[in-house]
Image (tube, rainbow, N blue to C red):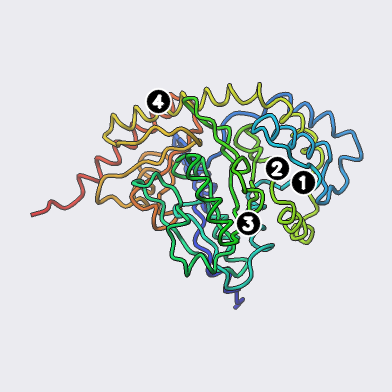
Amino acid sequence: MTRFSARLEALPKYPLTGIAAAKLRLRAAGVDLIDLGAGDADGPPPQGTIGELVGSLGDVAMHKYGFQLGLPRFREAAAAWMGRRFGLQVDPAHELLPLIGSKEGLAHLALAVVDPGDVVIVPEPGYQAYIGGAVFAGGEPHLVPLEASRGFLLELDQLPEAVLARTRLVYVNYPNNPTAAVAPRDYLERLVACCRRHDIVLAYDNAYSDITFDGYVAPSILEIPGAREVAVEFFSMSKSFQMTGWRLGFAVGNPEIIAALAKVKSYVDTGAFQALQHAAAWTLDHAESLIPPMRTELQLRRDVAVAALREIGLPVASPQGAMYLWVPLPAGIASADFATSALEAEGVMVLPGSGFGAAGEGFFRIALTVPPARLREAITRLGRVIAQLLAAQPVSA
């Protein structure tokens, strides 16, 4: 029998495992499925983006290896976008690196900076790419529960000094997946200061930087004084531009860390398809006109979903960022049981909080990936599931 590595065995089950198969099974059975599971937008990429991709396919040069340099035009467009969006000057040659989606960059960064036995701080609940990167690098994941009472903020400087002294890398993500929390500037200042004191590399996952509501504007971590000494920030084309399947993103930050990440990647990939980078460059050039309609639609969906959840007795907060709702469950209902019942009894797919780590228990995540009317229908169905599960609970004496 094949023996698999201890690293593989150390990985928790990925929360999206099985979703595709379940969807196929239910749809084949004629179920009216409403998928609120994966954060995968239901609309197409911008038409201009598609046009740029199609127009570039006749250029033979686009079909060659991009390697880690990638398409210089994409690097330049990403750097220019950083300047317009955050007021930051970025060297496209040395402070920026194209990625095959931000996920692979987040995971591969650990291979560049973590030695076996080093501590890697991982938020819980959190994106599983973080713990995957830590485990594959031979690091020791130190899980930090994100608590509602603390605004779901990872307060690094409140960890024991003995842990911080061994920590080499910390993963931080705001606007946050799955909790949808946002980070105040004074928090980011504390975070950067702690990383500088302890020589900790800060991986700042900013995939949802432009999915913000009610006038809130998410900052770049690189706006914080001293951040360029310790931080690398990760951006994605997936969420802001509905390009999830294109698998394209970029990292920005400390040039030495960027170079180390590029070295790792040179051994595991040969760069994203350059035609995709060409189309993404056009997209970033036009971000200011492309993002507002997406943001307006998601805010409408948020408002509809929050109101509907409150109507069925779930006191969910109305978040200022990300494309998710992090919904508390009534006491006594396990999140995995709820998600299974919602799927099998009502055809609604949500993710259980426990799928994002033990600290996520007591919640479930809704992705705002269907139109408002379907959201209302899904939440009506979820209300029936909760009523049934509550009715099945034993009556206390």
Say left or right for 345 vs 231. Answer: left
Question: Quick check: marks 1 and 2 in contact, CB under 8 Å?
Answer: yes
Q: CA distance from mark 1 to mark 2?
A: 7 Å
Q: In the rendered image, which quarter contains the C terminus?
A: bottom left
Which tag, 3 or 1, sits closer to the chain's start? 3
For residue 193, which numbered disc appears in the image?
Answer: none
Mark 1 sits on what residue?
Answer: 272
Q: CA distance from mark 4 to mark 2?
A: 31 Å
Say left or right for 195 vs 252. Answer: left
Instruction: Report the residue that reaches farthest toward the left.
Output: 397
Identify which amino acid the numbered label 2 is placed on: Leu
Identify which amino acid the numbered label 4 is placed on: Val
Q: In the rendered image, which quarter contains the N terminus?
A: bottom right
Q: Position of residue 362 (x, y in %)?
A: 33, 50
Q: CA distance from mark 3 to mark 4?
A: 35 Å
Mark 4 sits on what residue?
Answer: 304
Mark 3 sits on what residue?
Answer: 107
Identify which amino acid the numbered label 1 is placed on: Ala
Mark 2 sits on what residue?
Answer: 248
Tag 2 secondary structure? loop
